[in-house]
Image: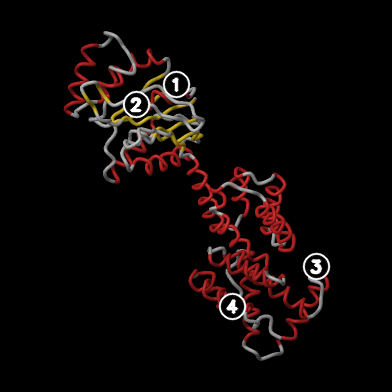
Amino acid sequence: MTTLISFLGRVPKTEAGYRKTRYEFPDGQQTDSVAFFGWALLKRLNVQRLVILGTAGSMWDHLFESDIDLGSQNDEERLALMEAVGAQTVQQGQLDALAPALSARLGCEARLAIIPYARDRAEQIALLETIAKHVEQDDRVHLDITHGFRHLPMLALLSALHLRITRNAQIQGIWYGAFDPDTGAAPVHDLSGLLRIADGLKALSGFDKDGDYGVFEPVLRQAGLSDEACTRLRKAAYYENILNVSAATGELRRVRHAIEAAQLPADAGLLLPAIRERLDWIDEDRQFEKQTRLARRALQRGDYLRATLYAYEAVITRLCQLERVPVEDFEQREQARKNYEERIKRAHDPQCDAYFLLKNLRNQVAHGTRGSTQEVQQALLNEQVMKEKLADLIASIEDGRLPVS
């Protein structure tokens, strides 16, 4: 079902009635002269439900006296409503009594509801709850904020996000008719593009939480990135998740090139610097440096499993490089590791302990056991200790103390 939610305010009123305005949509189409923009939207949009929200002092009487002609129907109720509007004391019961007549006249379900002034957090939450109450699961929703309070656009954006999460609603428009009293012009703006910016910020937040590049795919696809590039982005997320840094690097380089070559809209461009920053590890020259960067990023977001795995892999990759052993050859790699461990066991450099601490942490975190040494057990039982030890171990890789030469 498509639902239009329109806020009813209180425009200036003269002896001739409430001030009327002709609005102009982005495609050049002009509306009839109306005091309530919701009527123009209702005429333009194919909706099955109209929800009109206003305060006790909104121009409720206008709904039944001017743009919509009900003749002599519900005369007593309408007269009482006019008096209540003048005193700014409209009650929900009065609106409920008149809603059926409006529904019959409009040919769609009409709901009228009193809302608070949204002056504090409690009233703002109440407003969001009221809006959600009138939206069903999977509804298509248009929000009209033309006649609302000046702080309403911010609340409308929050409401749109709330409806998408709690009702799985599709927000198809956030409409604002911007009347200019100096020129008399009234262009109509669709502010729903702000939701794409919100989606991008959500994706950035999601990536910083779990490091999954896949969260960028819906945002970039909606912005116009090619199917091929989006597929490569998902592949890169998979490869990095299984620690295949070489394959992830190749895919991400192609994705970044596609992003740079594409002429993405401004809202996507707003996010590109942040996305580039999160891809900059692929510019490291050597694989162990990439693994070290990924280990530090994992540590920063509290992903201790990936931090230990990447840090340990960085040490082994660097060892293979120093020993001129192809890292992709498992047998040669394992032999190089065994030779290295036998060699450093005979050494007395304190950094030898660092290597075995990292190896034990990696083994215990990967297997979920209690720890082979007291030092490892302390780290497994205390997050702060784990964080400090991993930070020092990663720093040892960055400054060349690991692997021990």
Residue 349, how many percent across, how many down? 65, 90
Secondary structure of the residue carrying numbered label 3: loop
Q: How many marks?
A: 4
What's under tag 2, amino acid-wise? Phe
Indicate the quadrant where residue 248 lies.
Answer: bottom right
Please tell me which of labels 4 and 2 falls first in the chain: 2
* Viewer-nearest residue: 394 or 363: 394
Q: How far apart are marks 1 and 3 (CA)?
A: 66 Å
Secondary structure of the residue carrying numbered label 2: loop
Q: Name the residue under label 1.
A: 43
Residue drawn at 29 percent across, 43 percent down: 122
In the image, is residue 17 above or below residue 338?
A: above
Q: Mark 3 points at which residue?
A: 328
Q: Residue 36 carries which label?
A: 2
Please tell me which of labels 3 and 2 falls first in the chain: 2
Q: Distance between the residues labelled 4 and 3?
A: 25 Å
Q: How far apart are marks 4 and 2 (CA)?
A: 64 Å
Indicate the quadrant where residue 130 lies.
Answer: top left
Please tell me which of labels 4 and 1 falls first in the chain: 1
What's under tag 1, amino acid-wise? Lys
* Viewer-nearest residue: 311 or 275: 275
Tag 3: Cα neighbours inside 10 Å, few (<14), some, or many (≥20)?
Answer: few
Q: Name the residue under label 4.
A: 395
Q: How far apart are marks 2 and 1 (CA)?
A: 12 Å
Tag 4: Cα neighbours inside 10 Å, few (<14), some, or many (≥20)?
Answer: some
What's under tag 4, amino acid-wise? Ala
What's under tag 3, amino acid-wise? Glu
* Viewer-nearest residue: 175 or 402: 175
Residue drawn at 46 percent across, 21 percent down: 48
